[in-house]
Amino acid sequence: MEPEKSILIVEDEGEIRRFLRISLVNHGYKLFEASKGEEGLTLLSEKQPDLVILDLGLPDLDGMNFTKRAREWTSVPIIILSARNQEKDKIEALEAGADDYVTKPFGILELMARIKVAFRHSSAKDGSPEDPIFTSGDLRVDLTKRMVTFKGEEVHLTPIEYKILHLLVKNADRVVRQDVLLREVWGPGHAKESHYLRVYFGQLRQKLEEEPARPKYLITEPGVGYRLRVHETGS
Ligand code: CA
Protein backbone atom coordinates (compact mmCIF):
# COMPACT_ATOMS: atom_id res chain seq x y z
CA MET A 1 0.00 0.00 0.00
CA GLU A 2 1.21 3.49 -0.84
CA PRO A 3 1.90 5.79 2.08
CA GLU A 4 -0.85 8.34 2.64
CA LYS A 5 -0.27 11.49 0.64
CA SER A 6 -1.20 14.90 1.93
CA ILE A 7 -2.67 17.85 0.07
CA LEU A 8 -2.86 21.49 1.06
CA ILE A 9 -5.93 23.39 -0.17
CA VAL A 10 -5.63 27.17 -0.34
CA GLU A 11 -9.06 28.50 -1.19
CA ASP A 12 -11.17 31.26 0.35
CA GLU A 13 -14.57 29.90 -0.72
CA GLY A 14 -15.91 27.64 1.99
CA GLU A 15 -18.22 25.80 -0.41
CA ILE A 16 -15.38 24.76 -2.69
CA ARG A 17 -13.17 23.78 0.25
CA ARG A 18 -15.99 21.60 1.54
CA PHE A 19 -16.47 19.95 -1.85
CA LEU A 20 -12.74 19.31 -2.13
CA ARG A 21 -12.50 18.04 1.44
CA ILE A 22 -15.22 15.43 0.93
CA SER A 23 -13.82 14.20 -2.38
CA LEU A 24 -10.16 14.15 -1.43
CA VAL A 25 -10.68 12.49 1.94
CA ASN A 26 -12.79 9.86 0.17
CA HIS A 27 -9.84 9.20 -2.11
CA GLY A 28 -7.61 8.61 0.89
CA TYR A 29 -5.69 11.90 0.98
CA LYS A 30 -4.80 13.70 4.16
CA LEU A 31 -5.77 17.38 4.02
CA PHE A 32 -4.59 20.74 5.26
CA GLU A 33 -6.69 23.80 4.56
CA ALA A 34 -6.10 27.53 4.41
CA SER A 35 -8.50 30.29 3.38
CA LYS A 36 -5.77 32.90 2.81
CA GLY A 37 -2.47 32.96 0.96
CA GLU A 38 -0.22 33.85 3.88
CA GLU A 39 -1.81 31.18 6.02
CA GLY A 40 -1.30 28.75 3.11
CA LEU A 41 2.41 29.56 2.87
CA THR A 42 2.79 29.00 6.61
CA LEU A 43 1.06 25.62 6.41
CA LEU A 44 3.13 24.73 3.37
CA SER A 45 6.35 25.18 5.31
CA GLU A 46 5.10 23.62 8.53
CA LYS A 47 3.26 20.58 7.16
CA GLN A 48 5.23 19.97 3.93
CA PRO A 49 2.28 18.52 1.99
CA ASP A 50 2.85 16.40 -1.13
CA LEU A 51 0.73 18.69 -3.32
CA VAL A 52 -0.95 22.10 -3.25
CA ILE A 53 -4.32 23.05 -4.73
CA LEU A 54 -4.29 26.81 -5.06
CA ASP A 55 -7.17 29.13 -5.82
CA LEU A 56 -6.06 32.08 -7.94
CA GLY A 57 -8.48 34.56 -6.41
CA LEU A 58 -7.44 34.85 -2.79
CA PRO A 59 -8.18 37.91 -0.65
CA ASP A 60 -4.59 38.62 0.38
CA LEU A 61 -2.20 37.22 -2.22
CA ASP A 62 -2.50 36.38 -5.92
CA GLY A 63 -1.60 33.00 -7.35
CA MET A 64 1.55 34.27 -9.03
CA ASN A 65 2.99 35.70 -5.83
CA PHE A 66 2.02 32.65 -3.82
CA THR A 67 3.73 30.41 -6.37
CA LYS A 68 6.83 32.61 -6.63
CA ARG A 69 7.30 32.61 -2.89
CA ALA A 70 6.66 28.86 -2.58
CA ARG A 71 9.17 28.19 -5.38
CA GLU A 72 11.93 29.91 -3.41
CA TRP A 73 12.18 26.80 -1.28
CA THR A 74 9.95 23.96 -2.51
CA SER A 75 9.24 22.06 -5.73
CA VAL A 76 5.94 20.67 -4.41
CA PRO A 77 3.43 20.23 -7.27
CA ILE A 78 0.98 23.15 -7.42
CA ILE A 79 -2.36 22.83 -9.21
CA ILE A 80 -4.25 26.07 -9.74
CA LEU A 81 -7.99 26.54 -9.57
CA SER A 82 -8.97 29.37 -11.87
CA ALA A 83 -12.09 31.03 -13.20
CA ARG A 84 -12.71 31.37 -16.93
CA ASN A 85 -11.80 35.05 -17.02
CA GLN A 86 -8.44 34.57 -15.30
CA GLU A 87 -6.42 33.55 -18.39
CA LYS A 88 -3.69 36.12 -17.72
CA ASP A 89 -3.36 35.27 -14.01
CA LYS A 90 -3.27 31.59 -14.88
CA ILE A 91 -0.38 32.08 -17.31
CA GLU A 92 1.51 34.19 -14.77
CA ALA A 93 1.11 31.50 -12.12
CA LEU A 94 2.29 28.83 -14.57
CA GLU A 95 5.27 31.02 -15.46
CA ALA A 96 6.03 31.41 -11.77
CA GLY A 97 6.24 27.64 -11.49
CA ALA A 98 2.76 26.21 -10.94
CA ASP A 99 2.40 22.77 -12.54
CA ASP A 100 -1.10 22.74 -13.94
CA TYR A 101 -4.59 24.14 -13.59
CA VAL A 102 -8.26 23.26 -13.69
CA THR A 103 -10.89 25.79 -14.63
CA LYS A 104 -13.91 26.35 -12.41
CA PRO A 105 -16.44 24.84 -12.45
CA PHE A 106 -14.55 21.56 -12.62
CA GLY A 107 -15.50 17.94 -12.09
CA ILE A 108 -13.84 15.93 -9.39
CA LEU A 109 -12.71 13.30 -11.91
CA GLU A 110 -10.84 15.95 -13.86
CA LEU A 111 -9.15 17.20 -10.71
CA MET A 112 -8.25 13.66 -9.62
CA ALA A 113 -6.65 13.02 -13.01
CA ARG A 114 -4.59 16.22 -12.69
CA ILE A 115 -3.50 15.24 -9.17
CA LYS A 116 -2.35 11.82 -10.36
CA VAL A 117 -0.37 13.33 -13.21
CA ALA A 118 1.26 15.84 -10.87
CA PHE A 119 2.27 13.07 -8.47
CA ARG A 120 3.63 10.98 -11.33
CA HIS A 121 5.76 13.89 -12.53
CA SER A 122 7.05 14.74 -9.09
CA SER A 123 8.15 11.13 -8.49
CA ALA A 124 9.79 11.09 -11.95
CA LYS A 125 11.72 14.22 -10.92
CA ASP A 126 12.85 12.38 -7.81
CA GLY A 127 14.90 10.08 -10.00
CA SER A 128 12.84 7.04 -10.98
CA PRO A 129 13.55 6.58 -14.70
CA GLU A 130 10.83 7.51 -17.14
CA ASP A 131 9.45 4.93 -19.52
CA PRO A 132 11.16 5.39 -22.91
CA ILE A 133 8.04 4.17 -24.69
CA PHE A 134 4.99 6.39 -24.47
CA THR A 135 1.57 5.13 -25.45
CA SER A 136 -1.82 6.79 -25.53
CA GLY A 137 -4.66 5.06 -27.36
CA ASP A 138 -3.46 4.47 -30.94
CA LEU A 139 -0.40 6.66 -30.53
CA ARG A 140 3.00 5.22 -29.63
CA VAL A 141 6.27 7.11 -29.33
CA ASP A 142 9.53 5.28 -28.81
CA LEU A 143 11.83 7.95 -27.39
CA THR A 144 14.99 5.87 -27.72
CA LYS A 145 14.45 5.12 -31.42
CA ARG A 146 12.65 8.41 -32.15
CA MET A 147 9.96 6.33 -33.76
CA VAL A 148 6.32 7.36 -33.87
CA THR A 149 3.51 4.98 -34.78
CA PHE A 150 -0.19 5.62 -35.12
CA LYS A 151 -2.58 2.66 -35.35
CA GLY A 152 0.43 0.39 -35.75
CA GLU A 153 1.84 2.27 -38.77
CA GLU A 154 5.08 4.20 -38.61
CA VAL A 155 4.52 7.94 -39.09
CA HIS A 156 7.22 10.14 -40.54
CA LEU A 157 7.59 13.43 -38.66
CA THR A 158 9.80 16.35 -39.60
CA PRO A 159 12.48 17.24 -37.01
CA ILE A 160 10.40 20.16 -35.72
CA GLU A 161 7.22 18.09 -35.49
CA TYR A 162 9.14 15.47 -33.54
CA LYS A 163 10.60 18.08 -31.17
CA ILE A 164 7.12 19.38 -30.41
CA LEU A 165 5.74 15.89 -29.85
CA HIS A 166 8.73 14.96 -27.68
CA LEU A 167 8.19 17.95 -25.42
CA LEU A 168 4.51 17.08 -25.08
CA VAL A 169 5.33 13.43 -24.29
CA LYS A 170 7.72 14.58 -21.57
CA ASN A 171 4.81 16.52 -20.09
CA ALA A 172 2.08 14.04 -20.95
CA ASP A 173 -1.35 15.11 -19.74
CA ARG A 174 -0.01 18.43 -18.53
CA VAL A 175 -0.43 21.79 -20.19
CA VAL A 176 2.68 23.06 -21.98
CA ARG A 177 2.62 26.82 -22.40
CA GLN A 178 2.89 28.32 -25.89
CA ASP A 179 5.95 30.36 -25.02
CA VAL A 180 7.69 27.28 -23.57
CA LEU A 181 7.05 25.29 -26.75
CA LEU A 182 8.26 28.16 -28.93
CA ARG A 183 11.39 28.71 -26.87
CA GLU A 184 12.28 25.02 -26.60
CA VAL A 185 11.63 24.19 -30.24
CA TRP A 186 12.57 27.36 -32.13
CA GLY A 187 14.82 29.15 -29.65
CA PRO A 188 14.61 32.10 -27.27
CA GLY A 189 13.97 34.70 -29.97
CA HIS A 190 10.69 33.10 -31.02
CA ALA A 191 8.62 33.02 -27.83
CA LYS A 192 5.91 35.21 -29.36
CA GLU A 193 5.43 33.52 -32.72
CA SER A 194 2.35 31.57 -31.76
CA HIS A 195 1.26 31.25 -35.42
CA TYR A 196 4.13 28.74 -35.86
CA LEU A 197 2.35 26.53 -33.39
CA ARG A 198 -0.99 26.75 -35.16
CA VAL A 199 0.69 25.63 -38.39
CA TYR A 200 2.66 22.79 -36.83
CA PHE A 201 -0.17 21.51 -34.68
CA GLY A 202 -2.29 21.47 -37.83
CA GLN A 203 0.33 19.26 -39.51
CA LEU A 204 0.73 17.01 -36.50
CA ARG A 205 -3.00 16.52 -36.24
CA GLN A 206 -3.14 15.51 -39.92
CA LYS A 207 -0.64 12.77 -39.10
CA LEU A 208 -1.68 11.71 -35.62
CA GLU A 209 -5.38 12.24 -35.33
CA GLU A 210 -8.20 10.28 -36.85
CA GLU A 211 -10.27 13.47 -37.06
CA PRO A 212 -7.84 16.42 -37.16
CA ALA A 213 -10.65 18.91 -36.58
CA ARG A 214 -11.68 17.10 -33.42
CA PRO A 215 -8.38 16.10 -31.84
CA LYS A 216 -8.27 13.33 -29.29
CA TYR A 217 -4.56 13.60 -28.42
CA LEU A 218 -3.22 17.03 -29.36
CA ILE A 219 -5.48 19.31 -27.37
CA THR A 220 -5.47 23.11 -27.55
CA GLU A 221 -5.82 24.88 -24.20
CA PRO A 222 -7.20 28.24 -25.36
CA GLY A 223 -5.01 31.19 -24.52
CA VAL A 224 -2.49 29.04 -22.63
CA GLY A 225 -0.93 26.26 -24.68
CA TYR A 226 -1.29 22.61 -25.61
CA ARG A 227 -1.76 19.30 -23.85
CA LEU A 228 -1.07 15.74 -25.02
CA ARG A 229 -3.94 13.73 -23.63
CA VAL A 230 -3.26 10.24 -22.39
CA HIS A 231 -5.88 7.58 -23.18
CA GLU A 232 -5.82 3.96 -22.14
CA THR A 233 -4.21 1.88 -24.85
CA GLY A 234 -6.38 -0.82 -26.35
CA SER A 235 -9.65 0.88 -25.50
CA1 CA B 1 -11.47 32.69 -4.50
Image (spheres, rainbow, N blue to C red):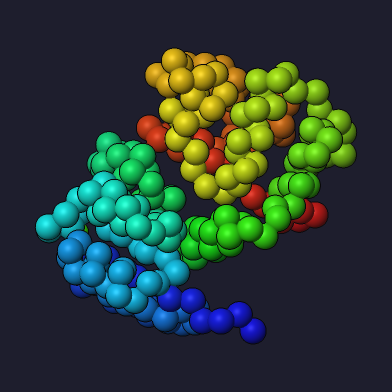
Q: Position of residue 122 (x, y in %)?
A: 54, 59
Q: Is residue 79 left or right of residue 62?
A: right
Pick the residue in front: 190 or 151: 190
Q: How many marks?
A: 0
* Residue 215 shows in the view: no
Quadrant of ligand 1 in image: bottom left
Quadrant, the N terminus: bottom right
Q: Position of residue 68 (x, y in %)?
A: 29, 49
Q: Quadrant of residue 153?
A: top right
Q: Is residue 22 above or below residue 85?
A: below
**For the point 43% across and 28% down, which residue is it?**
179
**For the point 61% across and 36% down, which residue is it?**
167
Q: Quadrant of residue 200?
A: top right
Q: Position of residue 109 (x, y in %)?
A: 50, 64
**For the point 46% across and 20% down, which residue is it?**
188
Q: Quadrant of residue 124?
A: bottom right
Q: Is residue 106 above or below residue 172?
A: below
Pick the residue in front: 21 or 53: 53
**For the point 27% across and 58% down, which residue is it?**
55
Quadrant, the C terminus: bottom right
* Residue 79 shows in the view: yes
Residue furthest right in the image: 153
Q: Position of residue 15 (x, y in %)?
A: 24, 72
Residue furthest front in the image: 73
